[in-house]
Amino acid sequence: MGKSRKYSNPQVGQQRKHKVTFMLTDEEQKTVDRYLEKYKISNKSRWYRETILAHILKTLEEYYPTLFKEPEMRR
């Protein structure tokens, strides 16, 4: 029996076609490599993508505009 995948492929029609490139210092790269090795992450590209998007989505959710200010909602 074949090895089952933990993650699915992108949905049909949602292929990744935008390339993003960035550079790291030697220290940053060592830190990333240690993290990936510690948590046995084999797909670095997926990890970068999920980590970055998770941070963006969390930030957008925190600063989502609301009708009332926070003190007014706590009354």
Image (cartoon, rainbow, N blue to C red):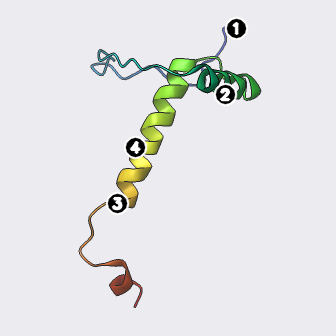
Residue 32 against residue 2 in the figure, above or below:
below
Q: Which quadrant would the N terminus be assigned to in this image?
A: top right
On residue 63, the disc is: 3
- Mark 1 lies on a secondary structure that is loop
Identify residue for label 2. Answer: 31
Give the residue type that dot 2 points to. Thr
Give the residue type that dot 3 points to. Tyr
- Mark 3 lies on a secondary structure that is loop
On residue 33, the disc is: none
Q: In front: mark 2 or mark 3?
A: 2
Q: In front: mark 1 or mark 4?
A: 4
Give the residue type that dot 4 points to. Ile
Q: In front: mark 1 or mark 3?
A: 3
Compare marks 1 and 3 and give the one earlier in the sequence.
Answer: 1
Residue 75, given in percent of the width and then of the height, sits at 40, 91
- Mark 2 lies on a secondary structure that is helix
